[in-house]
Image: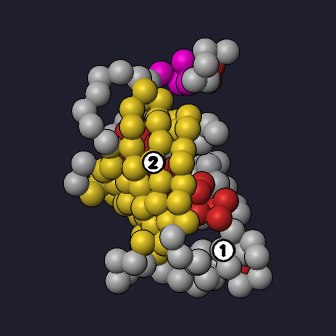
Amino acid sequence: MLAAAMTRFSRPEAHRCFICGPANPIGLHLQFEEEGEGVAADFTPGELHIGYEGLIHGGLLAAVLDDAMANVWAWRGQPAVTVSINVRFRKPVQPGERLRVSAEPVGARRAAMQRARASITRPDGTVMAEGDGVVMVGSLPAMMQGADGR
């Protein structure tokens, strides 16, 4: 999964990102902000995001976690894409719930492949979903080749 990250500082290559792109007419339009070493954004999924009746689709939540992890670096001006992700769904999410996604780097590394973790929580701190993954940080041409170099 290669989800490009874009922030309120608008990375041109991600203007149409479904999660954070301002130019995507059906997107979520998340606006990430710096939070500690990472980033966070508030969002409220709606009726259009249902999977099983009355529940938000897990794929949407996974995509939000994915984008948040890449935005740890993209928010700071470094192009980044998620190359692998593990997601754990902790509680069902219903349409109209106010949620917050936050992500942070895991460990200090200088390599292009970085580790990150993210979580989606309710305002009371209840964890709804969480994930961790590997994010490729670097030049856009290198990222367009993919993690396996092809």
Q: How much space separates mark 1 and mark 2, taking CA atoms? A: 20 Å
Q: In which quarter of the image is the N terminus?
A: top right
x, y percentage for residue 88?
Answer: 53, 60
Lateral position of residue 110 relative to residue 2, left or right = left
Identify residue for label 2.
132
- Regarding mark 2 in the picture, which secondary structure is present there? strand
Q: What stretch is highlighted in magenta?
A: 139-143
Judge whether 80 appears above or below 46 on screen.
above
Name which quarter of the figure residue 144 lies in: top right
Lateral position of residue 72 relative to residue 1, left or right = left
Q: Earlier in the sequence, mark 1 or mark 2?
A: 1
Q: In which quarter of the image is the C terminus?
A: top right
Identify the amino acid type marked 1. Ile
Res 43 seen here = no
Identify residue for label 1.
56
Q: Which residue is drawn at the image coordinates 59% and 46% (left, top)?
A: 15
Could you classify mark 1 by the number of other residues whose Cα lies within 10 Å: few (under 14), some (14-19), or many (20 or more)? many
Q: Which residue is drawn at the image coordinates 61% and 82% (left, top)?
A: 94
Res 148 seen here = yes
x, y percentage for residue 138?
Answer: 44, 24
Asked whether residue 141 is drawn in magenta, I would say yes
Q: How many labels does the image show?
A: 2
Q: Do the residues labelled 1 and 2 touch (CB within 8 Å)?
A: no
x, y percentage for residue 28?
Answer: 60, 64
Identify the amino acid type marked 2. Asp
- Regarding mark 1 in the picture, which secondary structure is present there? loop
Asked whether residue 123 is drawn in magenta, I would say no
